[in-house]
Image: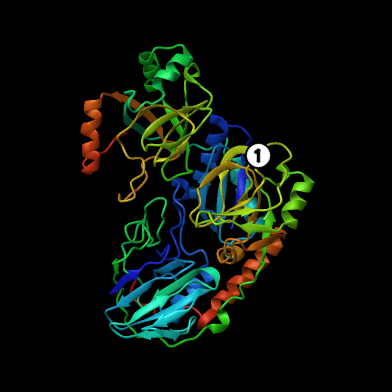
Amino acid sequence: MIRIVDPGPQTTVQDLGRSGHLRSGIPPSGPLDARAFVVANRLVGNPDGAAGLECTLMGPRFTVDTACAIAVTGADAPVTINGAAAEPWTTLALAAGDTVRVAAARTGVRVYVAFSGGLDVPRTLGSRATYLRGRLGGLEGRALKRDDVLRLLPVPTPAPHRTAAREAPILEAEPEIRVVLGPQADRFTAEGIATFLEGPYEMLPQSDRMGARLKGPRIAHAHGHDIISDGIALGSIQVPGDGQPIVLLVDRQSTGGYTKIATVGSFDIGRIGQVKPGQRIRFRAVDVPEAHRLRRTWEASLATAAGGPITTAPAA
Amino acid sequence: MALCVELGDEISAEVNTRVRALEFLIQSKGVPGVVETVPSFRSLLVYYDPGQTGYDTLCVALGELAAQTGTATLPPARIVELPCCYDPEFGLDLVAAAERLGLTTEELVRLHAGADYVVYFVGFTPGLPYMAGVPERIRLPRLETPRVKVPAGSAGLGGAQYCIYSVESPGGYWLLGRTPVRLYDPEAEQPTLLRAGDRVRMRPIDRLEYDAIAARVAARTYAPVIS
């Protein structure tokens, strides 16, 4: 059992999310940085989709009342166990009574904490992921608060000891994010597209799991910024009338009526999720075959990350 | 990954029926690699797994199905009856809307509750239905200043569209009344009530019945009439 002493600004239970419900207006949710999340699970001997914690800018402080293994990945944040520094991106064995603290991230935004067995919260629509705006899933559909208690699912085999320090991404100061132009790129002037690709755009503090709000050179529309509302893909970049782009993320609205200039490749969503408010990004256009190639490379690298998926899966 | 199939560039029953037909054809024929679909007024967003299908292969498969959407037969629509209280306490714009339309509030309620609405799609917020079928006589442009907060269950008119707010959210539609039925309940096994293609009818109720139904909704002993 885990008791939350201090939850941090926004810590939620996530698994790899729910699919099939966007047609009812319910987004997938799940981790913004899926790669870091999956690696954390593998480090504690869990299947990739076991439920763990996503923390924002600063992690939680918690105590455990049983021995278990944890791993901390994602943004670069100091980890301590009973006050002594501990390594991120590796399997950490905890004894009953240990207190873990994940402090403020030095670089990056989303920190992941996986627990051996995975967090035992009820499944809602097939998933344990929290969707905050819809008050759905996770622990009572909300972010964690002080004195929350989370249970772990049983672990049939002890966690392997693994390290994955080399999986820690290089969190660049000004990342280049790859996009496929469209579906409404024709609603912008040529200058508007050039402006968008020139950038740079600054991450605004009001960004969240629904969307990354950016500020930068104004993108000019050719004829109006409204369209007949249609579906919004993961990574869709809406440009409302003010010419400032919004990248729609895992907790996005299912449909919307603003022109979409481009879509961020799924392989770069995790990198966007690690951009701090005030940090800047640039966009680079790739074509569909190139996006597919980048996706395959990303999947191949994920397939072997941290020793690959755990095959002797604990009971879910 | 996802691609968007556009079946027209207008809000119309014909185009939206084709969108829903395409989704139905994908579901019933099972297109390899399709993970999830999201219908809207005039397009279908198709999420796919690039490990199972290629972009070009999928475009061909969807193109073939899109060509059949004009003749496909959709399964019969569900008819959902929603009780609605048109008291000005809930219908914050009822009096102003009636005045603007040159109707009495009774006539406006009769026209609104007398129509059959078709759910074109559900989206934006969980469980929110975008509906068509608003009688010509009661169409109004959207409010000039949207409200910051519209309570869940509010029945709103905006132009040729009708929606019922599923969660408390900002909104620019004229509010005529409120249903005590929850269109979105995160604690229910099936959290959303309506789906694309449903037909919705409003049944006017008084405040006493609203309270009685609201109590049953809270106790989870109420289910709307669906046929």
The three-letter amino acid code for the residue at tag 1 is His
Q: Give how far across and how far down residue B226 sits, in percent.
A: 31, 35
The structure residue drawn at horizontal position 75% and vertical position 52%, both measured from the top left corner, is: A195
Q: Give how far across and how far down residue B101 sits, in percent.
A: 47, 15
The structure residue drawn at horizontal position 37% and vertical position 15%, both measured from the top left corner, is: B105
Q: Give how far across and how far down residue A85 sits, in percent.
A: 44, 85
Q: Residues within 10 Å of mark 1 (few under 14, many from 20)?
A: many
Instruction: List the single residue furthest toward the bottom.
Output: A161
| Pointer 1 residue | A225
Question: Vertical placement of B110 versus B188: above or below?
Answer: above
Q: Can residue A47 be seen here?
A: no
Q: Nearer the viewer, residue A85 or B125?
A: A85
Q: Can residue A223 be seen here?
A: yes
Instruction: List the single residue furthest toward the right.
Output: A190
The structure residue drawn at horizontal position 45% and vertical position 79%, both measured from the top left corner, is: A79
Q: Chain of mark 1?
A: A
The quadrant of the rendering that contains the N terminus of chain A is bottom left
Task: State the image quarter where residue A302 is shown.
Answer: bottom right
Question: Vertical placement of B135 versus A251: above or below?
Answer: above
Question: Vertical placement of B21 versus A135: above or below?
Answer: above
How many numbered marks are there? 1
Question: Vertical placement of A74 versus A229: above or below?
Answer: below
Q: Give how far across and how far down residue A32 sits, in percent.
A: 51, 63
The quadrant of the rendering that contains the C terminus of chain A is bottom left
Q: How is the image coloured?
A: rainbow
Is residue B1 toward the left or the right of residue A182 in the image? left
Q: Nearer the viewer, residue A274 or B193?
A: A274
Is residue A29 toward the left or the right of residue A243 in the image? left
Task: State the image quarter where residue A170 is shown.
Answer: bottom right
Element under label 1? Answer: loop
